Image (cartoon, rainbow, N blue to C red):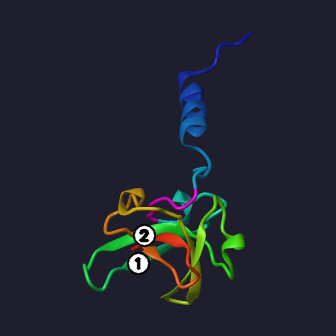
Amino acid sequence: MTPLRPSLVLCVAAFLACGGRPDTPYGLCRSVANCADLTPLCINFRNRITMVDVSLCSRECTTSADCPDRGACVSIVVGAWRALCMPRCTRNADCDFAGGFCATTPTGDMACVP
């Protein structure tokens, strides 16, 4: 049996450790490559009050039933999107991104919004 060359082993290890998309929806992102398959859009939000910019993984929705991981469909105008899935919450501490806070949506859901 021929031993594997160190460069081949390193390439395989790097692919296993870093390959593919993340599994968790609604994460922070710099591009769609940082987003899970369930939330494939990397959307940049700017809070007009706090002036905080944050990019989050999301997906378009019509109702909360369209949102993975028990997310909430929030009517929010960002570029071409009119409604996006956002993570649900019960308090501000549940929103783990800069400038995020827990708000009641018009449908009565609680969701993290930028």
Instruction: Answer with the quarter of the image where residue 64 lies.
Output: bottom right
Provide residue 84's location: percent of width, then percent of height. Answer: 57, 78
Name the residue: 53% across, 62% down.
Answer: 26
> Start and end of the magenta stretch?
25-30
Dot placed on the residue nearer the N-terminal end, 2 or 1: 1
Please say if 73 is above or below 12. below
Residue 5 location (% of width, % of height): 59, 21
**Closest to the observer: 35 or 102?**
102
Residue reaching furthest to the right = 1
| Residue 50 place in picture, x, y as percent | 25, 79
Label 2 sits on residue: 55
Which quarter of the figure has residue 81?
Answer: bottom right
At a point 49% along the width and 59% down the height, the residue shown is 27
Q: Split into 4 quadrants, where in the image is the N terminus?
A: top right
Name the residue type under label 2.
Ser
Q: Which residue is mark 1?
A: 45
Asked whether disc 2 touches disc 1, contact meaning CB atoms under 8 Å apart, the reply is: yes
Is 51 magenta? The answer is no
Q: Is residue 54 left or right of residue 11?
A: left
Residue 104, placed above or below residue 6: below
> How packed is label 2: few (under 14 Cα within 10 Å), some, or many (20 or more)?
many
Identified by mark 1, the residue type is: Phe
Label 1's element? strand
Looking at the rendering, which quadrant does residue 37 occupy? bottom right
Q: How packed is label 1: few (under 14 Cα within 10 Å), some, or many (20 or more)?
A: some
